[in-house]
Amino acid sequence: MRSVLRIVNRVLIGFIGLVLFVLGGSVLAVGLGVRPPSWWIHDGRHDVLLSIAERTRWRDQGWWWPVVIAGLAVLLLLALWWLVAVVRRRRLAEVFVDTGDGAGALLRGRALEGVLAAESSRLGGVDRATVRLTGRRGLPEARVRLLLEPHVDPGHALRLLTVEALAHARDSAGLAALPAEVRLRGAKHRAERVT
């Protein structure tokens, strides 16, 4: 799915860029005095893109406004889908593990996420951990969220995560590096009474 989206993204951007380049270049050329061919949309330097007759030709037809509104709604939905698909960071489905024989193996991303989250949750002072892998399958990146218990030193929890859980995941998957973005949050607790 990700490679299909990447291909659609590149083709769509390339097509839109080509159309804008051709139209903009032609308008510029006609505006600078180049005589266009007879079939071109502009006749000369002082010609407008759409005349009054062309703009108002279909206005009295009953089908015109529903078609225009439906077309614009479809374009808006496609643009929103494209924007969400491009901006959203997808979960990594597979991680490439170098087995040393040249062929390698593929490890499910969710399996590595689950193991990393379970080991992170067992660290001292961590109440709950969630992990999400992003990036490429040869160079994964981890996004870790830790919910820390009250009165835990965040620096100590981060050090334990780096030295133990992330190092174990990196070594077991045979990765050269496993960069991680870690977000720490303290668990809410009731105020303690001091007597």
Image (cartoon, helix red, strand yellow):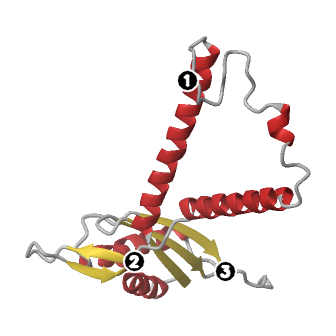
Amino acid type of the residue that numbered disc 1 sits on in the rendered structure: Pro
Going by the image, does 115 lie left or right of 150? left
- State the image coordinates of residue 122 (x, y, percent, origin top left): 46, 88
The answer to whether one can see residue 134 in this image is no
Front position among marks 3 and 2: 2
Mark in front: 1 vs 2: 1
CA separation in Å, label 1 and label 2: 53 Å
Which residue is rendered at x = 47% and y = 45% of the image? 14
Mark 2 packing: few (<14 Cα in 10 Å), some, or many (20+)? some
Q: For this rendering, which residue is in front, 128 or 51?
A: 51
N-terminal label among 3 and 2: 2
For badge 3, the amino acid type reads Ala
Quarter-of-image position of residue 72: bottom right
Mark number, residue 187: 3
Going from the N terminus, do you reach mark 1 or mark 2 first? Answer: 1
Q: Residue at x 43, y 68 (%)?
A: 2
- Return the residue at label 1: 37
Q: Are marks 3 and 1 in contact (CB under 8 Å)?
A: no
Q: Which residue is mark 2?
A: 93
* Rendered residue at 17%/76% (across/down): 104
* Quadrant showing the C terminus: bottom right
- At mark 2, the secondary structure is loop
Mark 1 is surrounded, within 10 Å at the Cα level, by few (under 14), some (14 to 19) or many (20 or more) other residues, namely few
The residue positioned farthest toward the front in the image shown: 38
Q: Amino acid at mark 2?
A: Ala
In the image, 162: left or right of 148? left
Decide which of tag 3 and tag 1 comes sooner along the chain. 1
The answer to whether 106 is drawn above or below residue 177 in the figure is: below
**92 versus 35 height, above or below:** below
**Can you see residue 20?**
yes
